[in-house]
Structures are given as C-alpha cells and as structure tokens.
Image (tube, coloured by chain):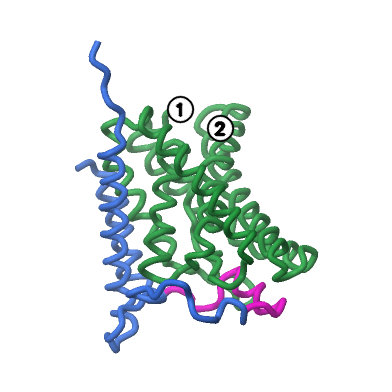
Chain colours: A blue, B green
Amino acid sequence: MEKWIIILLGVAVLVAVFLSPFASTKPDGLERVAEDKGFLGRGEGPQVVNSPIPDYAVPGIKNEKLATAIAGLVGMIIVAALGFGLGAILKRKEKIQ
Amino acid sequence: MHIPDGFLNAETWVTMDIVAGLGIVYAIRKTKTSLGERQIPLMGVMAAFIFAAQMLNFPIAGGTSGHFIGGVMAAVLLGPWAATLVMSTIFIVQCLLFQDGGLTALGANIFNMGIIGTVFGYYIYRGVMISFGGKKGLLWGVGIASWLAVVLAATFCSIELAFSGTVPLRAALPAMAGVHALIGVGEAIISVGVIRLILKARPDLLQRYG
C-alpha cells in the first residue's frame, strides 16, 4: 500500500480508538440550540430502531473509554469494508474496443 | 448535527427521504461511469477516516462541541458522486449501529451533511480553485467550500426544523448558523490539512470529476 494511504488509515485508527474516548462530551451545535430553544425533549422519546451499540459505547463494558474505543474500531472496519465494497461493485467497466 | 427521531414531522422527513434517495440513485448511476480502479481503496480509506473523525467532538465556545463532517474533503478526492455514496454509507451505519441520527431523519441527515458538501460544496471548491488558480487556489477552494458546507447544512437543518413546526426559523437559523460558523472553521482546517498531505504525496488524485 502507498504511504499516504497508510498515514490516513493510521490517523483514522488513532482517532477512532485512542482519541475518541477523550472527545468532548458537551452537546453538539444542534443539541445546544435544541436545549436553548426548548425542543430537546422532542428527540428524547424512544428511537425508531434499537441500535446494537447506542451512543458509540459497546454495552456490557464497564470501562466507558474502552467501550467507546471498541465501538470506534468496529464502526471503522464496517464503513471501510462497505466503502471498499461499493467501489469494487460500481467501478467503471472498461470498454472493449 | 445528526437529527434524532422526533425533531421532524412526517411531511418533512418523507420529503427529505425522497430527495436523498433520488440523490443516491443518481450518484450510483454517475459513479458506475466514472469510478476508476485506483479509487476503490480510496473509498474505503475515506469512509474509515471520516467515520473516525466524526467521532472526535472538539470543544467550541459556550459549552458546545462540534465535529468534522467531511463531505467536501471526500468530494475533492473522489468526485461528488462517489463521495455522496461514501457519506451516505457512513450516515446509514451511524444510524443503524450507533443510534447517531434517527431513522426517520436519515434522509435529512444524508442531504444536510452529505449531499450539500459533496455536490454543492464540490462546485464551490471548483469555482474558487479556477478563479484563484494554482495550488493556493485549490487549498483556498477546499477551505471556503468546507466552511460554507457546514453553515449551509446548519441552514437547511433549521429550515427542516421550522417546516416541522419544531422551532420558528427566526429562532433556529441565527443560533444554528452562528454555532456552525465556528464549527465550520474546524472543518476547513482539517480538510485543508488532509488535502495538503495528499497534494504532496499524490497530486494526480486531485483530478477533475464531471
């Protein structure tokens, strides 16, 4: 693999596994506005799908940082596989002259 | 800026599902005629990188955080249509696996944080790049388009909330655009940083897409 691909993948692993457990837990821009304008409660009802790893924390793991790190790694592998798979399926067919 | 279930009414989320769905169908058709062999690994790498970066909320002013979105960066490297598919994949996985963004709001989230950056942002990038010219023009294009995509995503999010009767536009828009004008600066810094790295290593990847 080329160097820059390894660098980008390395950064992705670093961020997902080692940095994301220490990400800011403050509300994001939309949550902040929802809180300030009084509609945050509308989004707190039951969600339509029950996700297996809600809020990027693997259930059953007591250590929150570890739960987030594993969630990050799992998610990263899945989206990478899907992205790669989509590319392989949709790639341009070379026309035979 | 992932909208959860409950913020949008049915008229709004169904409309946004249709808009996003049409965007994805068109993106699949365009990608089939444009995606080259060497971009296949890039789709996987971009998906992994953007997913990871979206987990990393950074603090901004006033007890609020923001995170990278990545649509413009993906489009600069993959072209608008393959980038649309990568971004949509990320939002679908985030929704189904991690409860980040509601299933009913999936179309709205794909449109706001995906298509606005990958399509609209891409053409802003092209426009700035061509007007300024050269490597500087390219990087300015990435930066400006990245910032604008975040602010526009916040604007569309506000409009969708207003249409749903969740919050009046005059209350939502200034607050959303204001916060995301700051978050957009982070978006621009990260996008320009990554594109600079790739410009040094593989300038041939920054080619033109239709």
Q: What element carries label 1?
A: loop
Classify B99 as above or below A38. above
Q: Residues within 10 Å of mark 2 (few under 14, many from 20)?
A: some
Residue sitting at 70 percent across and 78 percent down?
A36
Classify B139 as above or below A26. above
Protein chain holding label 2: B
Q: Residue under label 2, please give it.
A: B126
Which comes sooner in the sequence, label 2 or label 1? 2
Protein chain holding label 1: B
> Nearest the camera: B158 or A9?
B158
Q: What stretch is highlighted in magenta?
A: A23-40
Residue sitting at 62 percent across and 78 percent down?
A42
Q: Specify the quadrant of the image occupied by residue A77.
A: bottom left
Q: Residue under label 1, please give it.
A: B208
> Nearest the camera: B204 or B91?
B91
The amino acid type of the residue labelled 1 equals Arg
Q: Where is residue B136 in the image (x, y as percent from the top left)?
A: 54, 35
Q: Position of residue A74 (x, y in %)?
A: 27, 66
Q: How crowded is mark 1: few (under 14 residues within 10 Å), some or many (20 or more)?
A: few
| Residue B7, numbered circle | none
Image marks 2 and 1: residues in contact by CB distance under 8 Å: yes
Horizontal side, residue A22 vs residue B150: left or right: left
Horizontal side, residue B128 vs residue A65: left or right: right
